[in-house]
Amino acid sequence: MPDRDRAPDLLLLTVTLLLLGLGVVMVYSASAVLADQRYGDPFYYAKRQLMWAAIGVVMMFVMMRLDYRRLRPLAKPVLWLCLLMLVIVLTPIGAVRGGARAWLGVGTLGIQPSEFAKLGFILFFADWLARPAAKIESFWRGLAPALGLVAVAVGLIMLEPDLGQTVVLVGTMGVLIFVAGARVRHLVALGMSAVPVFAALVAVAPYRLGRVVAFLDPWKYPLTEGYHIIQSLYALGPGGLFGLGLGRSRQKFLYLPEPQTDFIFAILAEELGFIGAATVLLLFAALVWRGIYVAMRAPDGFGSLLATGIVAMIGVQVLINVGVVTGSMPVTGITLPLISYGGSSLVLMLTGIGILLNISRHAVRS
């Protein structure tokens, strides 16, 4: 059967649509009170999320039909475009939201270049690392040039500043480089050398240092740096086993700031309980598992690395978001894929999953 006639991985597609549908419902539930107070319309965020979801689904099905191998010649142009957008966003053209100059657009409609840079880097590195000349096992001839490109993007994103997106990009590229064959001792040495750099980045920004201090003892700073963590835990606790019921969250009544974005998992756990939260995590686990399966069955190195990068991006972001919500990591602005409110993140994730679904159509059958 020709590859174009093969069905995509149906489990991967089903899990994606389930998470997306739940995300739209939870965005409305989490944001209705805030939206009504801020805009006089309880459906304000939900309508926009539905619009972005529709755009994302169209992109997902387009990419699912487009042979992923046709993306390979676009790897370099896409990378340069992403880097250019990261530069442009730092100029007065870029919009400031949440203390970071990270958006291009007008009003509430805009895109976040750092989100698309993640997919752009995955595409470029999948193409480059799949070439025999990459020599990723060699530090100076292979790994160092790769790290140089990542360092450029990291520097630009940190100028916004956005430490959360930096961590996701570095984590994703780390997984991709490791799978491509980089030596473990090189990666361990780089990880150890990155610790003082990370510490310096935290130390030079008082708000970052405050988040780390609050992470260690949030109840010592209940009205300042520790506020988000405490309110998140107040949402998780009352949820119990089965939750308070959909739409019955207490923390969304202006206790937990912006509950529809970074902390939506806390509202979800409060309303749907441990069972609901665990089900969502199992759905994400199934998505990652099928993604790994697709990567292992890809017909070529480019497809395998491209699938690996997309899965790593999703997995790293889920781990960070859930870690922050549960108080296991310091607070950082990372959304929960397919669930949190946010146009750039949602469209990016669905586009990446569309590519993953296309690779699954070409996968080697057992």
Image (cartoon, rainbow, N blue to C red):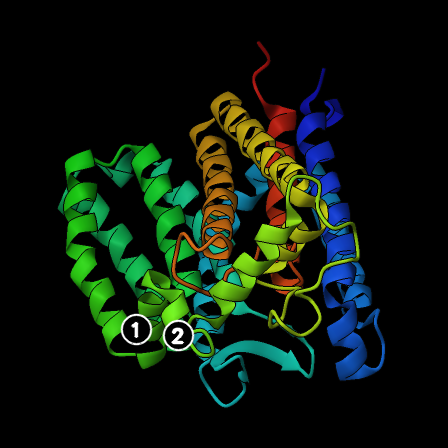
User: In x, y percent, where is residue 7?
Assistant: 74, 24
187 to 223, vertically: above or below: above
User: In x, y percent, where is residue 142?
Assistant: 22, 44
Give the class, few, some or many, for how many residues have Cα within 10 Å of label 1's Cα (few <14, many ≥20).
Answer: some
Q: Earlier in the sequence, mark 2 or mark 1?
A: 1
Q: Secondary structure at mark 1?
A: helix
User: In x, y percent, where is residue 50?
Assistant: 80, 59
Going by the image, does 318 lie left or right of 61? left
Residue 221 numbered mark, or none: 2
Residue 209 numbered mark, or none: 1
140 to 159, vertically: above or below: above
- What is the CA distance from the residue labelled 2 to the residue labelled 1? 13 Å
Residue 315 numbered mark, or none: none
Q: 144 or 114, which is in the foreground?
A: 114
Label 2 close to label 1 by CB (< 8 Å):
no
Residue 227 visible to the viewer: yes
Q: Secondary structure at mark 2?
A: loop
Quadrant that contains the C terminus: top right
Q: 34 or 231, which is in the foreground?
A: 231
Give the class, few, some or many, for how many residues have Cα within 10 Å of label 2's Cα (few <14, many ≥20).
Answer: some
Q: Residue at x 85, y 76 (%)?
A: 41
Residue 12 in which image quadrant: top right
**What residue type is disc 1 on?**
Leu
**What residue type is disc 2 on?**
Tyr
Quadrant that contains the N terminus: top right
User: In x, y percent, where is residue 76?
Assistant: 44, 55
Q: 276 or 315, which is in the foreground?
A: 276
Residue 348 visible to the viewer: no
Q: Residue furthest top?
A: 366
